[in-house]
Image (tube, rainbow, N blue to C red):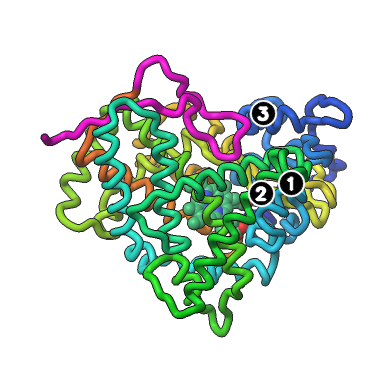
């Protein structure tokens, strides 16, 4: 019996099912404004008031929300919830309705398996030297510029790496047009879908087209015989049996990968912030890094750094970058703990609320990497910054290993070579009303070299 069957069966009592609990909300607008303004805060409050499953009304649709590993297992079961046609049309339009987050069944599994070929250990090991080089280049720069805002700098660094991985651009050259275009495209996902040249959504579509042009140029070059040792090449070369990605699939997914990189920037900035706020944790991680890593960094070194792994894991738990999954749609009536989840309702997995549940993570807002030493299955299943469930057969983030690698390389280079202090008096709360959270004040820091 699957976890989802257990979750559903546990609820099958002789009593009739109850309707999902729901907050009071305004007619027509529903909960949309509050949901967009602060998704994590809004869902955390609803979870406290209503429990692990509840209904909200967003984007004009009743939506079932699932919190915690048991409820999420109902949401993740494709027999209950599918993604096809579930997301707001303007979100699908920016990403492309045929992008992997919106696929189901065999079409999803085929695409996902091919995409995961670009994230094997062999592939990650081949990206490692470039990532180290770019992080090193930026770190040297940060020492020179006095106090500065880290978020924009990490954004430039992230997109320099993304450009090198996804379109083979020169990692030593920064291209501000790409990061600006992605910021405009991402802004369109939360904007009213008014298609005019001067609206946020209109500008998002224009930026999307510009970026697709960048991807097309890279694909043209590869079709013309160019080969590079980058992630795009891995995607082009990916084979599962006789299957391979078509040009259109490569175009759609490379664009999505670029967009997904914005989440890495949030992850890096919160990690930098937390290490500065917890010098004891930084000192322990530094000690481990110095013991485990001498010359060229390898995946083996990273695997041995258990404390660093816990630090990077805990930073993604305590400071959530992406509060929810993509939307799903309930395809058959199901239930959870006596509540009826009706067919046709929209559905989301609440990731931030799952990771801040005090029943699972005692003192959930405390940054405590040591909690992972004594963590059991429940904590492992509730650690969902990249979505829940399986990678190949489900919708869990394809880039999770790459994102983890990025966080570790960043922490290793910074802790080995530098110290950094946060400027006092700044707003460190996570941004609200943005797709990917970062520290609100931009994270002002001063970076100093450790050894003169
Ligand atoms: C810290 C960084 C990241 C975080 C927190 C993150 C988080 C997420 C989340 C929450 C989902 C949605 C899961 C769902 O709907 O059930 C997702 C999906 C996805 N992510 Fe990430 N992500 C990150 C980095 C990346 C990177 C770097 C890439 C690619 C290079 C990537 C590629 C994807 C893809 C392709 C999906 C869709 C998977 C599917 O639907 O099967 N992500 N990610």
The percent coordinates of residue 42 (x first, y second) are 67, 28
What's the CA distance linking mark 3 and mark 2? 17 Å
Residue sitting nearer the eye, 334 or 120: 120
Residue sitting nearer the eye, 37 or 188: 188
Q: What mark, if any, has residue 347 been given in the picture?
A: 1
Q: Which residue is depicted at the point 66% across and 46% down?
A: 204
Asked if disc 2 is less than 8 Å from ligand 1, the answer is: yes
Q: How crowded is mark 3: few (under 14 residues within 10 Å), some or many (20 or more)?
A: some
Q: How crowded is mark 1: few (under 14 residues within 10 Å), some or many (20 or more)?
A: many
Single out the residue that lies furthest toward the front.
197
The percent coordinates of residue 321 (x first, y second) are 52, 39
Residue sitting nearer the eye, 401 or 388: 401
The image quarter containing residue 442 is: top left
Please tell me which of labels 3 and 2 falls first in the chain.
3
Vertical position of residue 12 compared to residue 233: above or below: above
Q: Residues within 10 Å of mark 2 (few under 14, many from 20)?
A: some
Asked if disc 3 is less than 8 Å from ligand 1, the answer is: no
Vertical position of residue 405 compared to residue 119: above or below: above
| 254 relative to 14 in the view: left or right | left
Q: What element carries label 3?
A: helix
What's the CA distance linking mark 2 and mark 1? 9 Å
Q: Which range of residues does the magenta coloring cover? A: 423-452
The percent coordinates of residue 222 (x first, y second) are 48, 74
Q: Which residue is depicted at the point 29% across and 35% down?
A: 142
Q: What mark, if any, has residue 79 been given in the picture?
A: none
Please tell me which of labels 2 and 1 falls first in the chain.
2
The percent coordinates of residue 371 (x first, y second) are 39, 36
Q: What element carries label 2?
A: loop
Label 3 sits on residue: 37
Q: Is residue 380 visible?
A: no
**Main SS type for the magenta part?**
loop
Label 2 sits on residue: 326
């Amino acid at each position: 019996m699957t976890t989802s069957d257990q979750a559903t069966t546990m609820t099958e009592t002789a009593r009739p099912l109850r309707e999902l609990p729901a907050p009071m909300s305004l007619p027509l607008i529903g909960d949309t404004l509050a949901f967009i303004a602060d998704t994590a805060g809004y869902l955390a409050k609803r979870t406290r008031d209503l429990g692990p499953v509840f209904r909200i009304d967003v984007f004009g649709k009743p939506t079932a929300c699932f919190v915690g590993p048991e409820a999420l297992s109902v949401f993740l079961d494709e027999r209950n919830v599918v993604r096809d046609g579930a997301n707001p049309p303007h979100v699908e339009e920016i990403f492309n309705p045929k992008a992997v987050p919106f696929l189901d069944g065999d079409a999803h599994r085929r695409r996902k398996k091919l995409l995961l070929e670009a994230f094997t250990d062999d592939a990650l090991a081949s990206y490692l030297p470039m990532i180290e080089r770019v992080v090193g280049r930026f770190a040297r720069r940060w020492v020179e510029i006095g106090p500065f805002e880290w978020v924009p700098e990490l954004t430039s660094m992230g997109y320099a790496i993304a450009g090198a991985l996804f379109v083979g651009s020169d990692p030593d050259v920064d291209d501000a047009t790409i990061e600006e275009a992605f910021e405009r495209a991402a802004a369109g996902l939360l904007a009213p879908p008014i298609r005019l040249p001067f609206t946020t959504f209109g500008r998002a579509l224009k930026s999307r087209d510009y970026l697709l042009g960048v991807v097309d140029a890279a694909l043209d070059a590869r079709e013309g015989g160019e080969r590079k040792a980058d992630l795009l090449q891995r995607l082009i070369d990916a084979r599962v049996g006789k299957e391979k990605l078509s040009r259109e699939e490569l175009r759609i997914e490379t664009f999505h990968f670029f967009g997904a990189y914005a989440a890495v920037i949030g992850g890096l900035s919160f990690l930098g912030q937390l290490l500065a706020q917890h010098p004891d944790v930084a000192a322990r991680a530094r000690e481990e890094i110095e013991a485990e890593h001498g010359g060229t960094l390898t995946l083996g070194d990273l695997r041995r750094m258990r404390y660093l792994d816990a630090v990077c894991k805990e930073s993604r738990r305590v400071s959530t970058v992406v509060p929810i999954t993509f939307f799903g749609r309930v395809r058959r009536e199901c239930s959870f703990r006596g509540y009826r989840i009706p067919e046709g309702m929209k559905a989301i997995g609440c990731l931030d609320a799952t990771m801040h549940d005090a029943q699972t993570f005692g003192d959930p807002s405390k940054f405590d990497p040591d909690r992972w030493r004594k963590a059991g299955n429940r904590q492992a299943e509730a650690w969902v910054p990249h979505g829940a469930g399986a990678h190949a057969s489900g919708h869990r983030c394809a880039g999770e290993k790459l994102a983890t690698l990025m966080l570790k390389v960043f922490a290793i280079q910074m802790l080995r070579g530098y110290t950094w202090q946060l400027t006092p008096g700044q707003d460190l709360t996570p941004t609200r009303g943005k797709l990917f959270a970062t520290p609100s004040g931009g994270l002002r820091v001063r970076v100093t070299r450790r050894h003169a």
